[in-house]
Image: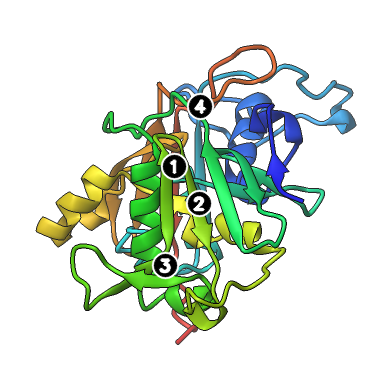
Amino acid sequence: MGTTDRTTPRRRGLTLAAALVSLALLAGACSKKDDNGDSAGTTKGTTEGTEPAKTAVSGGKLIMSGEAEVGNPWTPAAMQCDAYCTERAHAFFDPVAVIGSDQKVHPFLAESIEPNAAFTEWTVKLRSGISFTDGTPVNADAVIRNLEDSGTGLLIGKALGDVAKVPSAADPAKMELKIIKNDDLSFTVFTGDNGDVTKPLAWPGFDKAFSTQWGLIASPKWLDEVKADPTKAAMPVGSGPFIVESFAPRDSLVAKRNPNYWQKDANGVQLPYLDEIVFKVIEDSQVA
């Protein structure tokens, strides 16, 4: 069966890809603030005779830390991600799909992900009205561009060996994934045994691939800018809940709230709740 979701992702509970955002929401709801508006790092619990906050409070800053810097460049096709890199990436990139707490695939940027009867073709319909933070629309062209870049790259391409390959229209000597655009918000991905387009391969669990690094979607405008100037790879642009404000390799990444994020909570409050997340890198000198 395919995965169709007519509700907003916020109503499905915690998802692995959205775990970072959920942590940010919890911090905004439960943490005290100091005079500077930062999270004070303490939470009043029932041991002090107080009730946990029942309504999320917008604002505040969350500071996180990890032990290594492996993310840069931040283009989805080239990120050599560990867990901490993935947490940061989901702050500014949205995925096509996520794995929910029920261990099932749920559409995220997608509205639905449906296979044909033989599980050899998978059609993705995207949600309408979503934009990257540079104003570029999240549409079929943008998503296909990302899936092609990542799916034919050295880092991720091997894992997608059974996606059908065809000669590129722009360069027949180059092979690309067989992904057909149906309309502005819909496309179909085709499978093929070891990439052979003449040998469709049943792949019932293929929708999970959209929840991996392959499914992280960056602005195509930014990807073009990175191609022209690789230094811009340090300032990623996606459609996620936060916008990268600064990045200092092996030190910190600062992300500010995306005021135009496409999700709201059950009460209609704009997400994310936090104003800022600071991702610190604290390297362990004992780790080679």
Give percent across and percent down for residue 67.
49, 67
Q: Label 3: which residue?
A: 151
Q: Earlier in the sequence, mark 1 or mark 4?
A: 4
Residue that extends furthest to the top in the rendered view of this protein: 268
Residue 183 in sight here: yes
Give above or below for 71 relative to 1.
below
Q: Label 4: which residue?
A: 60
Give percent across and percent down for residue 119.
68, 61
Secondary element under disc 3, as helix, strand or loop, is helix
Q: Is residue 145 left or right of residue 128?
A: left
Residue that extends furthest to the front in the rendered view of this protein: 198
**Which amino acid lies under the numbered mark 1 shown in the image of this protein?**
Asn
Q: Which mark is residue 153?
A: none
Q: Is residue 78 left or right of residue 109?
A: left
**Which amino acid lies under the numbered mark 4 shown in the image of this protein?**
Gly
Secondary element under disc 2, as helix, strand or loop, is strand
